[in-house]
Image (cartoon, helix red, strand yellow):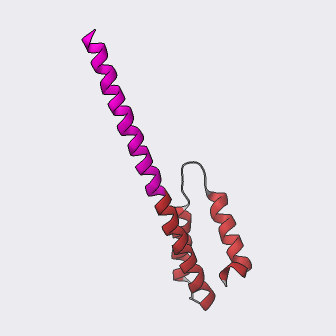
Amino acid sequence: MWLSKPACLDVVKKVWDKEDLHTDGSDAAQKEISRLNRDDMAAGSRSHVKALEKELDRIHGLEEQYWKQRSRIWLKEGQEGERLFGIVIKK
């Protein structure tokens, strides 16, 4: 299994080390998938690519959840802002 290969741990460490607060890791994972696709695809590489694609799907799902939550906050703040505006205008 790819998890038992030393290269897997190196790839995961590189991806996580490259992340900062403004990235979600998907760019690094996508670049690694592209690099592996360019290289000769040994059996271990194919399973590694599949694992990276699965991780990329997971990251995209988390990103979708994040933006959904943010949109709810923006909507709530917008409604409260309208209410405050109405109170100020009536005075």
Q: Position of residue 33 (x, y in %)?
A: 53, 75
Please name the residue shown 31% across and 14% down the image. Answer: 88
Membership of 86 in magenta stretch: yes
- Reply above or below: 45 against 81: below
Q: Is residue 55 above or below residue 83?
A: below
Query: Which is nearer the eye, 22 or 88?
Result: 88
Comparing 66 with 50, the one in front is: 66
Identified at 61% across, 56% down, the residue is 19
Q: Which of 13 and 3 is in front in this view?
A: 3
Q: Where is residue 42 in the image (x, y as percent from the top left)?
A: 60, 90
| Secondary structure mainly formed by the magenta segment | helix
Please report the residue visible at 30 percent of the width from the left and 16 percent of the height from the top. Answer: 87
Residue at the extreme top of the image, as rendered = 91
- Quarter where residue 77 is shown: top left
Residue under the point 26% across and 14% down:
89
Magenta-colored span: 63-91
Which quarter of the figure is the N terminus placed in? bottom right
Residue 41, horizontal then vertical, whole percent: 56, 88
